[in-house]
Amino acid sequence: MLCGTLSLISSRHSNFFGDFCRKGERCQDFADALIVFGGLVAIHILVLLFTAWSVDFRCFVQYSKVKDIYHADACKVTPSKFSGSKEIVPLHFRRSLAGSSSPPSDSEIYFDFRKQCFIFSKERKTFYKLPYPSKEPFGYYFKNTGHGTEAKVAVATEKWGRNVFEYPQPTFQKLMKEHCMEPFFVFQVFCVGLWCLDEYWYYSLFTLFMLFLFESTMAKAQLKTLTELRRVRVDAQTLMVHRCGRWVELPGTELLPGDVVSIGRSSGQNGEDKSVPADMLILAGSVIVNEAILTGESTPQWKVSISGRGVEEKLSAKRDKSHLLFGGTKILQHTPDKSSHLKTPNGGCLAIVLRTGFETSQGKLMRTILFSTERVTANSWESGLFILFLVIFAIIAAGYVLKKGLEDPTRSRYKLFLSCSLIVTSVIPPELPMELSIAVNTSLIALARRGIFCTEPFRIPFAGKVDICCFDKTGTLTSDDMEFRGVVGLTDSLDLQSDMTNVPARTLEILAACHALVFVDNKLVGDPLEKAALKGVDWTYTSDEKAMPKKGGGQSVQIVQRHHFASHLKRMSVIVRVQEEFFAFVKGAPETLQDRLTDLPSSYVDTYKKYTRQGSRVLALAYKRLPDMAVSEARSLERDLVEVGLTFSGFAVFNCPIRADSASVLFELRGASHDLVMITGDQALTACYVASQVHIISKTTLILSPARNGNGFEWISPDETDIIPYSEKEVEALSCSYDLCIGGDCLEMLQQTNAVLQVIPFVKVFARVAPEQKELIMTTFKTVGRMTLMCGDGTNDVGALKQAHVGVALLNAVPPAQSGDSSSSQSSKSKTKPVNPKKPKSGLELNGESKTISRLDPSAPSGSNRHIAAAEKHKQKLKQLMDEMNEEGDGRSAPIVKLGDASMASPFTAKHASVAPTTDIIRQGRSTLVTTLQMFKILGLNCLATAYVLSVMYLDGVKLGDVQATISGIFTAAFFLFISHARPLQTLSAARPHPNIFCAYVLLSLLGQFAVHILFLISSVNEASKYMPEECIEPDSDFHPNLVNTVSYMVNMMIQVATFAVNYMGHPFNKSIPENKPFMYALLAAVGFFTIVTSDMFRDLNDWLKLVPLPKALRDKLMIGALLMFSTCYLWERLLRWAFPGRMPGWKKRQPEVTATLQKKDL
């Protein structure tokens, strides 16, 4: 419709003028018609492009909204923030899966979005995710025998599809087309066209060359990433599957949710273990599995069957991890259960498939890598606002030119409109998208070299804004290596008994048998604490699940049944047989077992508190004699019956050494204006002791606990000398004098009394918290406006790591790997050898290439081909820029993150058994923030100056030559490139970067420097005009060298160099200008170049640049003026940095407001 209407208007316009115009005006009419026709073509092209750029615009143009979904054929999907952009997806209709005879209104409506299927619910009138059988009651799984008929198999296949990772491989041509359709690229091509119309041929053509070269490099890098991801596939192994009442062999790719399978350890022809093909629930048997590739858990995990679970109880993926096998993990050992209702034919464990394809744990991680990495620029919404501010300024300047130009009837309208277009487009330089993304990707590459990988690059700038760092304790701040100290609590004495010969036999039996240790390939693996206990009591454990003393005298203990440790229960138990008697051995948190003992010793609480105050980990031990029964009866005993009515058997005390660098890293973080918090599942007194050792707490500590009189709660110091009644209104005031600690039971109380927001933000240590409570703590911090970092080992911390702005999972299982020559200085310090390091293209070869280029420079032609020589220099500069991008992976695309590098636990994965990566991530985040901020300041000043030059000075006929513009472009590109590659300092500073572009510091800095620049420019041009008063400059004439043009070009370039030098943000975040060698050399080269040009030392060079000789008096004034301009801008910038330093976010002001708002909602 739009096309037809505009065409009709166009034809009427020409008919009207054709009837009434005189012959002399025909040429003018033809020119006007051409302009109108060109405008129509431009509008049509823009409409076409906007349908590719904007999903909303495409909906407006190509689709109409309907109320009845049965009349729709497409759906607009808007993902949550940072999960990608909107998309239009086709709706699919299929007959109800129950049969094909249903009427059209009963058809199932669904769409596929990013490898997930969404189905329309007629009852709720909305779409929901395709359900998988992963949240059913345990009774459903007990009865399940797989798909009973071929019809059910066909329905399941149609519903869930094959168990594969299908991702189409796009061609280079298709990717290149997508890149060339991007808004910035089209805008840049449009700008190049405008410069061509103004006869800047060499500058325009080589800008275009740079764009195509850069976009092709981008497309090539993206193709490489997608090719790498396509290599990840479901292992081609054959499994026994129970279908249609019999066992059949099927490949892993044919598995369907609901299939009952026989699963066990399987290896390929090369001896490498095959991975689990889908997410499964173990129905019978037990499995030892390595989950390091997904969760980072270094200890192999014991997975057990669901036998013994309540029939009505529903499966929970978070709570029941001990029954689940995740896709992509590797089985190290399996033990079948021959007593199950369904016997496996090959001795495997019986399991039911829950999720397949992209819905498995491995598939979810792949989707994260594929679809969550689109935004790779810092401050994206602020970038848009800042550019809008510059465009408004440019429109004002263009309006001024248009008004003045229309007042002069002799001015060419074509040249006038062209100059107005150039002014508006000049505010966005061609390098902008490249430079903004380089700032983020330089950080990504630097982190990858240090063994830290990121699946969500948009979080890099968040790391620079972090103001509170939260840490797990066990396995994060403390090492996994436990030391068994001894046993206490068996007598009235509070002294530790470290001589095991004086410890009762029953206590030794509990320590030796109540564990989840297992043999894998003749090696004992499991929890380090349990291995330390076994070693400490000097017992041995055999592969047939029998514990016995190494020295004679004791009785062997045969394990019959295990009830594994659960974080929500805080205990574990085993049923054992000693000779012919059955016992239940239990161990767990002292406060948990306290209520389950039949006879509680009087010194029970005092004993365990004494050792937890010293930072030791204390476990309560207990046992229960069971009546005579058969082994099968013992195995079927319910857990709740086993773990009550216990007899106390002492406390086991363990030392958990703090990692060597934990204290120094946290001290650095604290000194860098960060609040520190510990979130742990350990006991409060132990947590407080460790927190005091690693600088998390420094004042007297108060722990919130139930009041001794039974009424309410009270704050108690670890030594119980200070007792203060609890009041939620006094928590903030209390936090000024004390460091506060609360436990998981108190968190439940806070939730019930709606006091979460009044208390949690002021607490330093959280103890005995469940994984769900860790998540609550992180969301509370975020609600009150804090920028959060969470560092954990990726097991119980998954929810908190995902909730934090910056989540860092430590993969202890994999040693850190360095890649690339530029990290040789780091790898030389590291004692850990990389795992299968790739051999990258050596830095020497790349440097050799650039040296060859520089040697080719002098052979450039001279004389009449000087324009081509300038173009060659520009081309070589761009090639060097591209070489550097290729050397570092790519300029705008992030380094490839593979499944072995990433963890499903969090956006950042560090291959270190240390908290040191947190400082690396924060340093790179701060560096990205300040680099982006300085880029916008420089961009703003350059654009304001350019808009002024192209408007006010253009009216006076002042223009730039083609070669001059090319040289200017080369310097700008080089400066931007070198500042974006600035390296952060090794130590974190107490000063904080400004988190936002729009702040008093930035605006005052821009306005002050712009005023100085304009004053210098106007005074210099006016001074030059005095030396050529008689010469008349035609505004629309071609470029001719003259004194005013020469001075304005020199002043412009001086301002440009001064802008980069003054606004460079070095210490305390990045390396200073002398330390950033490439940038310093570029500045010195620019200063040297302008000194030579201004002094007219080489006349041939000035002739080539179309610069006329300067009178000596003018030259001296110019040099003095440049020095004054630089000094004034430098002093103004330093004054503002001192007056407006970065500050901690004012979350304490926001906290009462958020609390009041939520209370109003509750009312």
Image (spheres, rainbow, N blue to C red):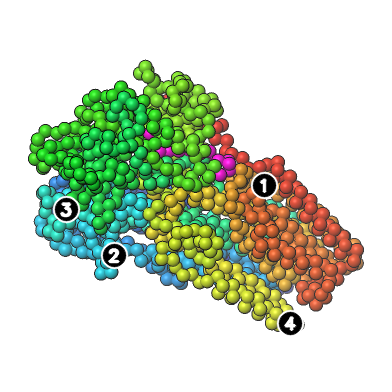
Q: Is residue 990 above or below residue 426?
A: above
Label 2 – label 3 distance at C-alpha: 22 Å
Which numbered dot is residue 272? 2
Label 1 environment density (alpha carbons within 10 Å; few <14, some 14–19, many ≥20):
many
Q: Secondary structure at mark 4?
A: loop
Q: Is residue 542 above or below residue 777?
A: below
Q: Secondary structure at mark 2?
A: loop
Query: Mark 1 or 4 closer to N-term?
Result: 4
Residue at the spot 28% in from the left edge and 38% down from the top edge:
500
In which image quadrant can residue 570 be found? top left
Kindly identify which residue carries mark 1. 1002
The spot of residue 1123 in percent (x, y) is 81, 57
Which numbered dot is residue 862? 4
Query: Mark 1 or 3 closer to N-term?
Result: 3
Which numbered dot is residue 336? 3
Quadrant occupied by the C terminus:
top left
Between disc 2 and disc 1, the foreground one is 2
Which amino acid, by three-letter code, is at mark 2?
Answer: Glu
Residue 256 in view (yes/no): no
Label 2 – label 1 distance at C-alpha: 57 Å
Label 1 – label 4 distance at C-alpha: 45 Å
Q: Is residue 905 left or right of residue 343?
A: right
| Magenta residues (range) | 668-684
Disc 2 and disc 1 in contact, CB within 8 angstroms: no
